[in-house]
Image: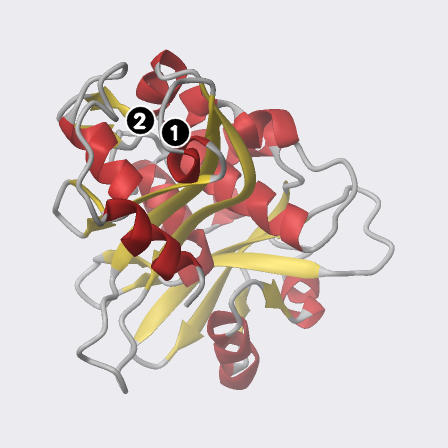
Amino acid sequence: MKRVPGRAALWFCLGRSLICLAWLAAMSNSVRSIDSPLVEKLKSTWRAQDGETIEQVLSNVSKVAQFVPQMWGVAELGQGDFVFVAWTRHRNNESAEQYVITWKIGSDGAIELASTYAKPMELGWRALALSLIAREVADGERDANLHFLHDPTNFNFVTTPQGQLGDLLRQGRCTIVEPVGVDYLPKRNDKPSEKGDLWRVLLLVNCNIPGPRYFTQNGVITFEKSIGQGWEPQSNFAKRIATFPPGSWFQRMEPDEGDELRDRRYR
């Protein structure tokens, strides 16, 4: 398999949150993944946290998101190799817009997903699909799969002491509205005191149940998960979902809870 040279071009791809130079994908058009031991190593050893292989993740995502995998490639950059898969949003890609998902293969053989925007795939294929579809909506893409984005069962990868988030939302008669966020947030080196190196799921929901309007209409649900840790509720609504079963979320209200939530919305 042909290796792709060009330190500057690949670092450009790694540094961007999503879009990559078409040059990188063009260089890999004649590459076949079966010819590369590094690509085969990635496919045989990488696993999402739920056990899915990379091929299962990419295949499932391509069925629900605007995600068309193309060619695999390998780039050599001094201290390690980078394996990448190029993809586009549309099969007839008239704009020649190309994207990549990149993994770093360390000198000790360790595999690390280097593309921050694709880090939700470490949670499983649904998390990556939701993240990409949410980005499609934000970018104004036509025919984004809103049904998948708003289906509560697709958020069952978020677990709470009361059960899986999607099941709890359905039992609580909640529907998901815009915006939706499924993201990985790396810690910024220049702001070590801020949170980072975590996954965040943010939902707005409308719930057909009795309760304060600031919860039941455009209620904010936010969960975060640090590496190696479980999901932790962050918003007031999320804390109620994680603490009480559906049907009793609002039986007890703190006196200043509504004011606090409204203040957060308008900061």
Tag 2–tag 1 contact (CB < 8 Å) = yes
Q: Is residue 78 above or below residue 68?
A: below
Q: Nearer the viewer, residue 61 or 151?
A: 151
Q: Which residue is mark 2?
A: 165
Kindly tell me whether residue 23 is visible in this rendering: yes
Q: Nearer the viewer, residue 114 or 219?
A: 219
Task: Say how many tags the image has.
Answer: 2
Q: Nearer the viewer, residue 208 or 62?
A: 208
Q: Which residue is mark 1?
A: 155
Q: Residue 62 at x, y = what percent?
A: 60, 33
Q: Look at 61% across and 59% down and name the residue there.
A: 99
The numbered mark at residue 177 is none
| Residue 263 falls in image quadrant | bottom left
- Give the residue at the far right of this rendering: 94
Tell me the crowding category of disc 1: few under 14, some 14 to 19, or many 20 or more residues within 10 angstroms, Cα based.
Answer: many
Q: Look at 50% across and 48% down and name the residue there.
A: 35
- Amino acid carrying mark 2 in the image: Leu
Q: Nearer the viewer, mark 2 or mark 1?
A: 2
- Amino acid carrying mark 1 in the image: Phe
